[in-house]
Image (cartoon, grey):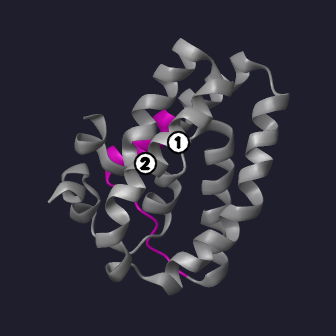
Amino acid sequence: MIRGFTGFGTPLFLAPTYAVLFGPAATVPLIILQEIGATLLTIRDAWPRADHREMSGFLLGCIPTMPIGAALLGILDPNLVKKVMSFITLAFVAALWSGWRYRGPRTVPVRVGLGALSGLTTGLAGIGGPPVVTGGARWPLRLLRGGYEFR
């Protein structure tokens, strides 16, 4: 239900809530499993419309940094991780609410860097979508709403 309203922002809502209820170490895998399920439901329709060239840069950055984020999740104090999750959530909600988006060139290094940030935040906090959306995806914001996925 929450995904229908928030779309890619579901982890922004769930990560802090789950972290308080279950702790950070249980939160991240739970969110990732939920996101995999939601992705499987939408991938057939989204795949033909995806800009695979653009997304490959994000993927190249994400793959090596997600395990780093997961390692930090296992090493850092759980209370610190909860604070980091909250900070990430507040920062990206503020950016999205203000309408801020990166408007510079979307070169390969920029996409790889944004993918790296996305991977790090996914591994550490389960929140990987906002860096890509605010930082460089070319999609209009109207296409990123949660309701778009269920049309």
Q: CA distance from mark 1 to mark 2?
A: 6 Å
Marks 1/2 in contact by CB < 8 Å: the verdict is yes
Q: Secondary structure at mark 2?
A: helix
Q: Amino acid at mark 2?
A: Gly
Q: Secondary structure at mark 1?
A: helix
Percent x, y for residue 36?
Answer: 48, 50
The label number, if any, that marks residue 33 in the structure image? 1
Residue 126 vs 133, above or below: the answer is above
Residue 1 within the magenta-colored segment of the rendering: no
Residue 23 vs 147, above or below: the answer is above
Image quarter where the C terminus lies is bottom left
- Tell me the crowding category of disc 2: few under 14, some 14 to 19, or many 20 or more residues within 10 angstroms, Cα based: few
State the residue at coordinates (19%, 55%). 150
Q: Amino acid at mark 1?
A: Leu
Residue 1 at least partly seen: yes
Residue 5 vs 115, above or below: the answer is above
**Left of 48 or right of it: where is 128?**
right
Percent x, y for residue 59?
Answer: 62, 70
State the residue at coordinates (77%, 50%). 67
The label number, if any, that marks residue 37 in the structure image? 2
- Tell me the crowding category of disc 1: few under 14, some 14 to 19, or many 20 or more residues within 10 angstroms, Cα based: few
State the residue at coordinates (46%, 21%). 17
Asked where in the image residue 142 lies, by quadrant, the reply is bottom left
Magenta residue span: 89-106
Image quarter where the N terminus lies is top left
Asked where in the image residue 126 lies, by quadrant, the reply is top right
